[in-house]
């Protein structure tokens, strides 16, 4: 593979440690997203390592906000927590929350569309993605 040595940007300046250690010491855990409307940043803090999107909806105005790729001060106060459900019980707990969010934001969706979205969400987690929920929703 010719791209074997390419280091992801967010890790490029980090000291090399055992790659099997989850959330290494010194690895950035806080990221921010900025929209085009001058709102405060939407700040995400990782409880667990995992892939987050390049764009999310701005926490304030719900338009598209772009990632700063973790190149932000790590002491920003987060609105959202990124986490990977640690077991089936935790996934079940947050699956309900995710479904409620979609039902509120996409009231036109059929049950089938909702179930397809939930299946896609489960796939996203299985492939190393994380869920993001408001800080006060994470128990
Ligand atoms: Zn905004």
Image: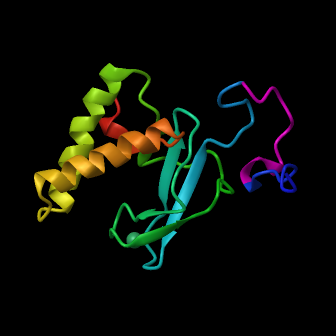
What percent of the width, then of the height, locates residue 129?
50, 43
Name the foreground residue: 3 vs 101: 3
Q: Start and end of the magenta stretch?
A: 10-20
Residue 133 visible in the shown view: no
Please tell me whether residue 91 is drawn above or below residue 52 in the rendered image. above
Name the foreground residue: 56 vs 5: 5
Please tell me whether residue 20 is drawn above or below residue 63 in the rendered image. above
Tell me the quadrant of the picture where the C terminus can be found.
Answer: top left
Name the foreground residue: 48 vs 72: 48
What percent of the width, then of the height, locates residue 85?
41, 29
Horizontal relation, residue 45 to residue 18: left or right: left
Dividing the image into four equal quarters, which quarter contains ligand 1? bottom left
Horizontal relation, residue 66 to residue 25: left or right: left
Q: Main secondary structure of the magenta part?
A: loop
Q: How is the image coloured?
A: rainbow
Q: Residue at x 47, y 79 (%)?
A: 36
What percent of the width, then of the height, locates residue 113?
20, 56
Please tell me whether residue 88 is drawn above or below residue 35 in the rendered image. above
Q: Residue at x 20, y 61 (%)?
A: 105
Q: Residue at x 22, y 51 (%)?
A: 101
Residue 75 visible in the shown view: yes
Horizontal relation, residue 45 to residue 60: left or right: right
What percent of the width, then of the height, locates residue 69?
64, 58
């Amino acid at each position: 593979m010719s791209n074997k040595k390419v280091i992801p940007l967010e890790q490029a300046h980090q000291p090399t440690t055992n790659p099997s250690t989850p959330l290494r010491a010194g690895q950035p855990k806080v990221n921010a997203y900025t929209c085009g409307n001058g709102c405060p940043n939407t700040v995400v803090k990782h409880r667990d390592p995992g892939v987050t999107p390049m764009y999310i909806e701005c926490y304030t105005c719900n338009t598209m906000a772009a990632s700063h790729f973790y190149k932000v001060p790590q002491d920003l106060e987060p609105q959202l927590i990124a986490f990977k459900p640690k077991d089936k019980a935790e996934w079940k707990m947050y699956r309900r929350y995710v479904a409620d969010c979609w039902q509120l934001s996409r009231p036109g969706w059929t049950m089938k569309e909702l179930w397809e979205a939930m299946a896609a969400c489960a796939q996203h987690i299985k492939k190393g993605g994380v869920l993001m929920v408001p800080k006060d929703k994470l128990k």
